[in-house]
Amino acid sequence: MASVPLSFGGAVNIAVRKVREDYPKAQLLVALATTPNDQYVDSPRGFSHLKVVFNDGGSGSVIIESTVWGEFGPSVHIDSPILGNAVIPWPVQMDAPEADTLLKDAGYTLPYNSLALHQPVYPGMNEPYYDFNLKDEGSVFVGTSTHKVFPPGRETSAKVESSLKQLRTLGE
């Protein structure tokens, strides 16, 4: 019997369990899926790397990165908070393949080079979002509760891009 590839949500769940072994009060902030060399994919199953960021339950942060999809190296503790995103109640109400379907059904069919699950701390951002970074278009959000699909405004987009750029370099 062929094995089914681990979903985005399944991989994040493994990261949550692993981090909470050492930091029981850890709270999920961001899960960022990428590919080597920023290659573009047309499905969440195309990603090969996952970086997951947590609040440690106090004033610090914890980062864990996949070594291969669904397997993680040791967590790294940072003594300061990672700002810009609200805590994501885990698990969320939809997994990435459903968000991808909603994205495409809304007419956003270009490939993307990253997928972030996060809730930016910004007016009007009231739920966790899947944030697809589409080729030539930039971020398009899919709400995990409302299922609303939308590109953020220019100001929101600039803040989100800056936050995700910083996240990519954390722990390096």
Image (cartoon, helix red, strand yellow):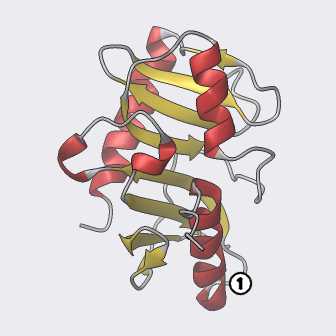
Q: Residue at x 57, y 55 (%)?
A: 8
> Between residues 69 and 31, which one lies in front from this camera angle?
69
Along the horizontal axis of the image, is 119 left or right of 158? Answer: right
**Residue sitting nearer the eye, 44 or 80:** 44
Residue lying furthest front in this view? 1
Few, some or many residues within 10 Å of mark 1 (<14, 14–19, 20+): few
Residue at the spot 58% in from the left edge and 45% down from the top edge: 117
Q: How many marks?
A: 1
Residue 90, picture quadrant: bottom right
Q: Residue furthest toward the left? A: 37
**The disc labelled 1 sits on which kind of residue?**
Pro
Residue extending farthest bottom? 22
**43 up-or-down from 6: above or below:** above
Asked if residue 128 lies left or right of residue 134, the reply is: right
Rendered location of residue 6, percent (x, y): 56, 64
x, y (%) of residue 98?
A: 69, 37
Residue 53 appearing in the image = yes
**Quadrant for the C terminus in the image:** bottom left
11 to the left or right of 132: right
Q: In the image, what residue occupies the spot 59% across and 32% down? A: 100
Q: Which residue is labeled 1 in the image?
A: 24
Q: Secondary structure at mark 1?
A: loop
Q: Decide: is 98 above or below 63.
A: above
**Looking at the figure, which quarter contains the N terminus?**
bottom right
Q: Nearer the viewer, residue 11 or 92?
A: 11
Q: Is residue 121 visible?
A: no
Q: Position of residue 72 (x, y in %)?
A: 44, 78
Q: Which residue corresponds to the image point at 53% horizontal and 62% vertical from the top-left? A: 5
